[in-house]
Image (cartoon, helix red, strand yellow):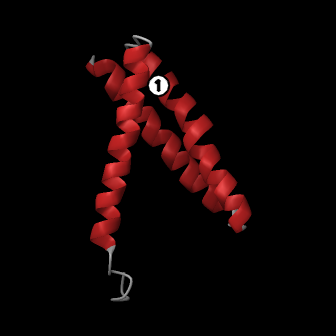
């Protein structure tokens, strides 16, 4: 970031992003606890399911209305799918 104006608010964005990730992990843990899910394979399936069905679809719906490039859809969608998959594995193995 060479533009000094672009750096303004970066701390707030990172803090809010962390809070949202904790909320997502908490929701995954509630699902895992409710259905008594354990093991890395189950965690991977849970993360992929929630990543594709909730995170990626929400991003894609918003991006379609904003007419953003397909590449951006894929990058951000896959980023969220991977994040949910990793969180699902950690939560289901941790039990």
Would residue 61 be found to the left or right of residue 1 on screen? right
* Count of number-bearing discs: 1
- In the displayed structure, would residue 16 be above or below residue 44? below
Identify the residue shown where x is 33% and y is 26%.
91
Is any part of residue 88 visible from this angle?
no
Q: Is residue 42 left or right of residue 87?
A: right
Q: Is residue 75 above or below residue 9?
A: above
Question: Does 4 appear above or below 13?
Answer: below
* Whole-percent x, y for residue 24 in the image: 41, 40
Q: Is residue 13 visible?
A: yes
Q: Specify the quadrant that holds the N terminus.
A: bottom left
Q: As rendered, which of 3 and 30 lies closer to the eye? A: 30
Percent position of residue 8, x then y: 32, 81
Residue 74 in percent (x, y) is at 62, 53
Which residue is rendered at x = 36% and y = 36% of the image? 25
- Residue drawn 27% across and 69% down? 11
Where's residue 80, x and y in %? 50, 46
Q: Which secondary structure, mark 1?
A: helix
Q: Residue at x 37, y 13 (%)?
A: 38
Which quadrant would the C terminus be assigned to in this image?
top left
Dividing the picture into quarters, in which one does residue 31 lie?
Answer: top left
Determine crowd level at label 1: few under 14, some 14-19, many 20+ residues with C-alpha closer than 10 A: many
* Displayed quadrant of residue 2: bottom left
Of residues 86 and 20, the one nearer the viewer is: 20
Q: Choose between 90 and 18: the one closer to the eye.
A: 18
Q: Is residue 22 left or right of residue 28?
A: left
Query: Toward the viewer: 58 or 1?
Result: 58
For label 1, the residue is 44
In this view, 89 is above or below 33:
below
Q: Looking at this view, name the residue that lies furthest to the top.
A: 36
């Amino acid at each position: 970031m060479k533009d000094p104006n672009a750096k303004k608010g970066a701390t707030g964005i990172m803090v809010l992003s962390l809070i949202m990730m904790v909320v997502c992990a908490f929701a995954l843990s509630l699902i895992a606890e409710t259905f008594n899910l354990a093991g890395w394979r189950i965690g991977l399936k849970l993360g992929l399911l929630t990543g594709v069905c909730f995170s990626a679809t929400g991003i894609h719906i918003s991006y379609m209305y904003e007419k953003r490039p397909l590449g951006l859809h894929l990058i951000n969608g896959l980023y969220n799918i991977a994040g949910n998959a990793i969180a699902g594995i950690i939560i289901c193995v941790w039990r």
